[in-house]
Amino acid sequence: MTGGRAGVSRFARSVLAGLSLWLFAQPALATQQDTLARGQRIFILANCFSCHTDSENDGQPLAGGRELKTPFGVFVTPNITPDPSSGIGDWTEQQFLLALGEGLSPTGEHYFPSFPYTAYQSMTRRDMRDLYAYLMSRQPVVQDNPPHRLQWFVSRYLLGGWKAVNRWLNPRLTAEQQADRGYYLRAALGHCQECHTPRNMLGMLDRERDLQGNEMLEAPDLTPRNQQGIADWSDDELEEFLRDGLYPDGDYVGGHMADVVEHSTQHWSEQDMAALIASLRAIP
Amino acid sequence: MKKTMLLLAFLLIAPTLQASEDFEAEGIIKYRKAVMTAIKGHNLAIKQVVSGKFPNHGQISYHVNALGDLFSELDSLFPDGSDFGKTNAKSEIWDEPEKFSKTVQKSRQAFQTFKAAAASGDLKTTGKALKAFGKGSCGLCHKTYKKKPKK
């Protein structure tokens, strides 16, 4: 009888301990889920998928291998799945932040700006950390990174100087600019200027002509200077384009912008879409 | 002497032959662009009806049928030799014809799905299906095979 009571008491204590642990773990679990959900939103807003997935050849999500053809050569995007050998699985959060914020690899190598750290450097620390958590929660894929095929004059060793000059010409967003949601979406996460702003001979953005189009990339002028461009569209037409890829005349978008619509803008929240449109309308 | 005469005759005719081929390609490209313009026109017309901006719902079937006719000739719009000049069509169409053919096939399937939805007569269903059709047909093809976005 006594043994029985002791058994029940032991059982009750175990249940209580388990319950307490479960209750204590709830806020941590909720925080983790919140981080992952925020990270997923950042992932979509920054459109990581379309460059880091070789969709044209049915590549695995985020395993890289997509070729970006530029006047400086062909850049092949890397594997950003959490595979430790070929992806970013063995990166610490700090190393990830360094890659986004400074364009540096964990071994200290400079990244080519085909990876738009020039825009991502203006992301908030929290957005970077949430994105890291989300990427680390993805399915790892073992897929080695093929080398870039670059023009003879393009060298990684020159990038340190390039970055210093570029940082001077294109500084990080200020805290005030980061707080302007539409501007932050356009210039940091959405990195619109990377395609829509003309570049100088060294491949740096010409911010004096911000978003005035890049002929080499066939990206149109988004400013009111372009009378046939978005300045002539209603807000509804602009949203329809960003959600469905539909032009006001019934045509559908092609090229890289089709990827942007498919993997990014069509999934944006109403608030973010409205903020982006307002910001696009504010371009001088 | 005979051979020389034949060679001379060929050299005289050859540029004409080339010019005639160019002319043919130019005609095909213009025709292709006209068909694409027609497709987007019907697309836009349906959109106006389903979004409630044009009251005659009966016009939907007219535009759907016209789209069906236009979609049936998609394959013949990209013959060999029509890959240069004033065209926005990417060379991948001719470099990887099987892959392109599969994309055209998917476009047609997307149209059939849309056609079935439009036959329901329900504007909301048709409007939703129109978006999916646009993305899954025109959008799908343009993503890989259309060179230049609009200015």
Image (cartoon, rainbow, N blue to C red):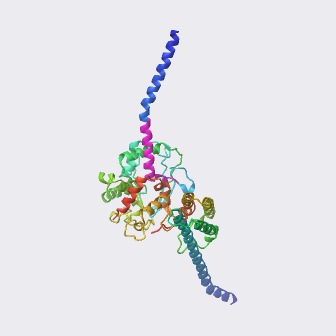
- Give the main secondary structure of the magenta stretch: helix
Q: Is residue A94 above or below residue B124?
A: above
Quarter of the figure with the C terminus of chain A: bottom left
Q: Residue, x 44% and y 60% (percent of image)? A: A239
Residue farthest toward the top in the current orientation of the protein: A1
Q: Is residue A57 above or below residue A133?
A: below
Q: Is residue A112 visible?
A: no
Q: Residue B32 lies in what quarter of the image?
A: bottom right
Question: Is A267 inside the magenta-drawn segment?
Answer: no
Q: Position of residue A2 (x, y in %)?
A: 50, 9
Q: Is residue A137 left or right of residue A189?
A: right
Question: Which segment did they paint magenta?
Answer: A29-53
Q: How many marks?
A: 0
Q: Position of residue A155 (x, y in %)?
A: 41, 58
Residue farthest toward the right in the current orientation of the protein: B2
Q: Is residue A193 left or right of residue B52?
A: left
Q: Residue, x 44% and y 33% (percent of image)? A: A26
Q: Position of residue B94 (x, y in %)?
A: 60, 67
Q: Is residue A23 above or below residue A120?
A: above
Residue B97 versus residue A3: which sits nearer the camera?
Answer: A3
Q: Residue B16 lies in what quarter of the image?
A: bottom right
Q: Is residue A7 visible?
A: yes
